[in-house]
Image (tube, grey):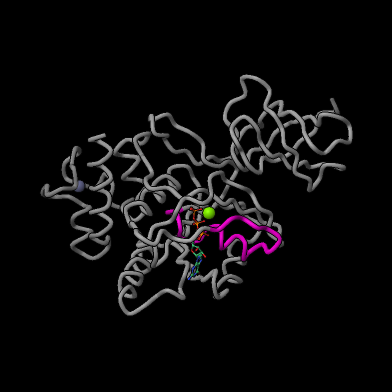
Amino acid sequence: MGPETTGTVITNFGAQVDIEGDQVPFRGTVVRCFKRGNMDHLVSGDRVVWQPAEKNLKTNGVVIAREPRKSELLRPDRRGKLRPVAANIDRIGVVFAPRPAPQSNLIDRYLVAAENHGIAPFLVLNKTDLVTEENRAAMEQLIETYQFVGYEVIRVSAATGEGVALLNNYLGQHTSILVGQSGVGKSSLINELQPDNHSTVGALSESSDEGTHTTTASKLVHLDNGGMLIDSPGIREFGLNHLDSQRILEGFVDFRPYINQCKYRDCQHHKEPGCALLAAVAQGNVLPQRLQSYRQILKSEINR
Ligand SMILES: Nc1nc2c(ncn2[C@@H]2O[C@H](COP(=O)(O)OP(=O)(O)OP(=O)(O)O)[C@@H](O)[C@H]2O)c(=O)[nH]1
Ligand SMILES: [Mg+2]
Ligand SMILES: [Zn+2]
């Protein structure tokens, strides 16, 4: 084996991972590695110690250890076991588009998770070229909702290039991940932001107008301005059963000034007298669709 060295996980394939080395001769080179036995799950963005198979051989190696994560986005898998999605990221971009039709509750779930993991969220409306008379009002309502909450909303089109420079600027030198439903154009955007990258892009299903789950493994891409961006597979739902109702409530950042201000300590913010959250909605300080979304999340997580 060659000497121990450090690197970053580009893609996790399960049994194997692609590692980009930090040091010459491996800097900028992606090496397919096995993991040493009993190593836990690795994800894009993880920092690792690894060993090339031979001193200068750039084809394979072994990951020996993972460095502690500065941040991690977590999500329960189908069996409810909590799994990391990406590591060492500081921003999460939730992408939506006119097609496939957005699910605002899924967006809110991402936001709640991001806020709970201390990762700063922003929103990206992609496919501005597909905004029509029929869907314009719905898109504007989503944009206004999230701007009202205080989130940055960036409008782009991977097809026409509109807004891509703006998005690039916003990403800056941060390490970010793009998330969202399948088919919203995450991979297309990353290909636009980094023309050297050629991630596979898939057409929407003709029958359902939904994405076809083209990306199957997250991948970290370097941006020319020094930032890093992770492409992730589109998902249908984002479970939050690892968070209790208080943490879910706190994940709605616009609710925070009103939490613990209700007359009753066990207030469910439903129709109780003296509810500070309901009063905030009545006064226009919190949007009703956000409270509705919170209730929907709570209901589905409790019934799980
Ligand atoms: N009109 C238009 N189509 C776009 C735009 N961006 C992406 N698309 C198309 O949308 C479809 C899905 O794009 P992808 O980039 O594969 O979407 P994704 O979010 O990566 O999807 P998954 O990998 O399945 O999660 C493809 O047919 C793209 O060509 C855009 O700005 N405008
Ligand atoms: Mg994709
Ligand atoms: Zn209340």
Residue 26 vs residue 54, the one in the foreground: 54
Q: Residue at x 27, y 63 (%)?
A: 285
Query: Range of the magenta residues?
Result: 180-201
Asked whether 76 falls inside the magenta stretch, the response is: no
- Horizontal relation, residue 133 to residue 118: left or right: left
Image coordinates for residue 304, horizontal then vertical, percent: 26, 34
Q: Is residue 265 shown above or below 140? A: above
Q: How many marks?
A: 0
> What is the x, y in percent for residue 98?
39, 67
* Position of 65 relative to 254 (above/below): above
Quarter residue 102 falls in: bottom left
Q: 58 above or below 199?
A: above
Left or right placement of residue 269 versus residue 7 in this view: left
Drawn side of residue 26 relative to residue 14, left or right:
right
- Choose between 39 and 262: the one closer to the eye: 39
**Relative image position of residue 185 (x, y in whole percent):** 50, 61
- Which of the 4 quarters of the picture holds residue 22? top right
Q: Percent x, y for residue 145?
A: 33, 65
Quadrant in the picture for the N terminus? top right
Residue drawn 46% across the image and 76% down it: 129
Q: Is residue 191 one of those drawn in magenta?
A: yes
Residue closest to the far top: 38
Query: Please, which residue is most extreme toward the front here?
Result: 207
The residue that appears at 55% across and 58% down in the rendered structure is 201
Horizontally, residue 239 falls left or right of residue 199, namely left
Residue lying at the far bottom of the rendered structure = 133
Q: Is residue 227 above or below residue 80?
A: below
Name the dominant secondary structure of the magenta segment: loop
